[in-house]
Image (spheres, grey):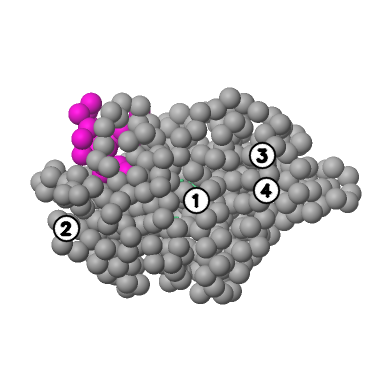
């Protein structure tokens, strides 16, 4: 096992009715800005619950944070934070609202230059931020309890991540009931995203991280079992609870501590979203099977372990088991409702050179757990995903 330091400072309030308890987690006297997306929280009553929990306190609201949140929109919220002297941000929504709010928090106090530099320097120069928390309504990204955020810039077609110790939510409310109103497409996206987060920290090469491996396999098996049930039984509390907790644990730092991490699928996927507007998890469903196929030799030992422990594939040659495991992964994504080929989204492959050019511009020239996926390799991975 590799050395690691792990700090997961986000307090989790999990379960039905927990929104009512969030008031006492926010410092007394704080001027609070509730941030949200396109309005789903108004329709399903989550905003009402949050307002009630904060009754009598100085609360402001900023809505309209879009999926794949944009710098342009978020900078408008930064103005509100400054004008109203906000000192606590409460993100209510999915990963986009949580990510956007993380950016708002650090951009509002950033003095090292233009706030877009936060993305260009991946957060390295951030020294402060407005404290924040999240009420999660879409289990997927893990953003509710990690320090990362992915921000898009409409004007330039960029989608970049930053990380900062000032971006950990101080607490996160995870009430599975809030997820009952998710449309099937977002249920699928969430399950696929959490699945791929787990795979990107598990399916690399063995370092005797047996605890991490078993945790990862447990998350993958849970998502394989509960994901289709979430589609079939949208109001099954226990199904939703297990999906929600899996998604948080998939990217709160726990399973990735002390083991190699890949992230090539995510980096290539972000370019697909930026250029073609695909949902984040749709891009992952396209790219991951292609990455596994392309790197099957480097990932051989873990692919065999994945085949046996996650898909129960024990018969046939090693190559046959690996091929069957990759096929099972593809079938799972398709079954959830996320096609795994570019062509299924009307993308013919003519933009692959431009996508590779964007990877180059963003410094993604040595991806994967061995940093051996060059631009030429990314091009082949995308070609094979047509
Ligand atoms: O905007 P509203 O009206 O709220 O509707 C949203 C949005 O249209 C809707 N939704 C959310 N909760 C709902 C609901 N609809 C009905 N009922 C509910 N309970 O779902 C739509 C998608 O929301 P979004 O927040 O965009 O989805 P997700 O949580 O998948 O977040 C995706 C973003 O997170 C980034 C992605 O790149 C993408 O920008 N990621 C962030 C990560 C992180 N911070 O660690 C890691 C991930 O790999 C990912 O890159
Ligand atoms: Zn993701």
Q: Residue at x 51, y 39 (%)?
A: 253
Q: In the picture provided, is 316 more to the left or to the right than 116? A: right
Q: Which mark is residue 211?
A: 3
Q: Nearer the viewer, residue 78 or 269?
A: 78
Mark 3: few/some/many CA within 10 Å (<14, 14-19, 20+): few
- For marks 3 and 1, the one nearer the N-term is 3
Which residue has dot 2 on it? 57
Specify whether residue 121 is in view. yes
Residues at circles 4 and 3 in contact by the CB criterion of under 8 Å: no
Which numbered mark, 4 or 2, is in the foreground of this view? 2
Find out whether residue 181 is within the magenta segment: no
- For marks 4 and 3, the one nearer the N-term is 3
Q: Residue at x 49, y 54 (%)?
A: 140
User: SS class of the residue under badge 2?
Assistant: loop
Look at the image and tell me in which quarter the N terminus lies. Answer: top right
Which residue has dot 4 on it? 217
Judged from this view, the residue extending furthest toward the left is 83
Mark 4: few/some/many CA within 10 Å (<14, 14-19, 20+): many
Specify whether residue 264 is in view. no
Distance, label 2 to label 3, CA atoms, is 44 Å
Where residue 269 appears, as percent x and y from the top left, is: 51, 45
User: SS class of the residue under badge 3?
Assistant: helix
- For marks 2 and 3, the one nearer the N-term is 2
Where residue 13 appears, as percent x and y from the top left, is: 41, 55
Q: Which mark is residue 248?
A: 1
Q: Ligand 1, what quadrant?
A: bottom left
Distance, label 3 to label 1, CA atoms, is 18 Å
Distance, label 1 to label 2, CA atoms, is 29 Å
User: SS class of the residue under badge 1?
Assistant: helix
């Amino acid at each position: 096992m590799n050395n690691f330091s792990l700090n997961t400072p986000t307090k989790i309030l999990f379960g039905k009715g927990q929104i009512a308890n969030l008031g006492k987690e926010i410092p007394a006297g704080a001027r609070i800005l509730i941030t949200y997306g396109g309005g789903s929280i108004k329709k399903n009553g989550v905003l009402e619950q949050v307002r009630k929990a904060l009754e009598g306190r100085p609360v402001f609201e900023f809505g309209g944070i879009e999926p794949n949140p944009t710098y342009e929109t978020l900078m408008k919220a930064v103005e509100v934070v400054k004008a109203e002297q906000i000192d606590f941000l409460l993100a209510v929504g999915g990963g986009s609202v949580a990510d956007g709010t993380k950016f708002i928090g650090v951009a509002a106090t950033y003095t090292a230059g233009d706030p877009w530099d936060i993305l260009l320097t991946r957060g390295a120069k951030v020294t402060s931020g407005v404290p924040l928390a999240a009420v999660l309504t879409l289990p997927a990204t893990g953003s509710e309890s990690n320090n990362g955020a992915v921000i898009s810039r409409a004007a330039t077609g960029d989608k970049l991540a930053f990380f900062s110790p000032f971006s950990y939510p101080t607490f996160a409310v995870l009430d599975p009931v809030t997820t009952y109103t998710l449309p099937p497409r977002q249920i699928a996206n969430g399950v696929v995203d959490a699945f791929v987060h787990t795979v990107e920290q598990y399916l690399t090469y063995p370092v005797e991280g047996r605890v991490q491996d078993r945790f990862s396999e447990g998350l993958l098996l849970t998502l394989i079992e509960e994901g289709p049930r979430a589609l079939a039984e949208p109001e099954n509390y226990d199904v939703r609870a297990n999906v929600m907790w899996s998604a948080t644990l998939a990217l709160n730092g726990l399973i990735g501590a002390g083991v190699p991490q890949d992230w090539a699928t995510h980096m290539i996927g972000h370019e697909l979203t930026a250029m073609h507007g695909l949902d984040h998890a749709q891009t992952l469903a396209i790219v991951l099977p292609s990455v596994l196929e392309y790197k099957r030799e480097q990932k051989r030992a873990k692919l065999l372990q994945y085949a046996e422990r996650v898909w129960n594939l024990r018969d046939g040659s090693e190559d046959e088991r690996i091929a069957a495991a990759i096929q099972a992964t593809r079938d799972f994504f398709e079954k959830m409702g996320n096609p795994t080929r570019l062509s299924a989204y009307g993308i013919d492959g003519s933009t692959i050179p431009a996508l590779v050019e964007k990877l180059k511009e963003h410094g993604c020239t040595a991806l994967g757990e061995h940093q051996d996926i060059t631009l030429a390799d990314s091009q082949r991975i995308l070609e094979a995903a047509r």
